[in-house]
Image (cartoon, helix red, strand yellow):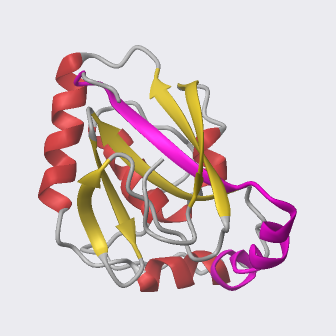
Amino acid sequence: MFNDDLLRLVYYRGRSISDLTVRAWPVVTRYGAFSAYSHVAIMRGNHKIESKPFVGVQEVMWNEFYNPFHLTCIADVFEIKELTPEQASIGWAFLQEQKGKKYDFKGIFGYATKMYFQDPNDWFCSELAERMSEVITMKLTPTYKPHQVDPQLQAGSKLLVLKASFTTTCAKLGTF
């Protein structure tokens, strides 16, 4: 899809009316923050790195996505304004180092309860993306710590520009 070395953030959101009833899951994980976006991944070229429950941080092809909470979803692809190739390389190197780390259940529970505790060696999706933005010195949400951020808050960053949107069936593992 994208054959370059830019870093992109891919934010996923439900699409259909039936998703609204299924989307009640943020009540548990986000303490009532009904965010339009339920997940974020960081993409470079044809690969993406993401943190998912029970899987942790992994690298997959850009078009692989599974979300049992949405029947169909839209993937919004954002680019980071004025990102240099050096920053992209530093960010991707950081993400490569995180592969294999566990999902941060403690952090997502801390977010949901507004207690903001976390496991510094584990990541939930937006926490990983936020930390990567700190590493490349282009923090998406300057007034928040990584474990205090959800995908909706990040997607509203002035540093991001929407470049593409794709619709997919995501109730089963598949491709766009």
Query: In the rendered image of this protein, does residue 109 appear above or below residue 120?
Result: below
Residue at the image point whose x is 33% and y is 26% from the top: 2
At which x and y percent is residue 73?
Answer: 64, 55
On the rendered structure, is 118 left or right of 155?
Answer: left
Query: In the rendered image of this protein, does residue 79 appear above or below residue 143?
Result: above
Start and end of the magenta stretch? 4-30
Query: In the rendered image of this protein, does residue 115 appear above or below residue 153?
Result: below
Q: Quadrant of the N terminus?
A: top left
Residue at the image point whose x is 40% and y is 71% from the top: 52
Which quarter of the picture shows residue 106? bottom left
- Residue closest to the eye, 78 or 138: 78
At which x and y percent is residue 8?
Answer: 40, 33
Asked if residue 28 is among those painted magenta in the image, a careful observer would answer yes
Residue at the image point whose x is 75% and y is 73% from the top: 23
- Residue closest to the eye, 119 or 66: 66
On the rendered structure, is 97 left or right of 78?
Answer: left
Residue at the image point whose x is 51% and y is 31% from the top: 78
Which quarter of the picture shows residue 67? bottom right
Asked if residue 175 is among those painted magenta in the image, a careful observer would answer no
At which x and y percent is residue 171?
Answer: 57, 71
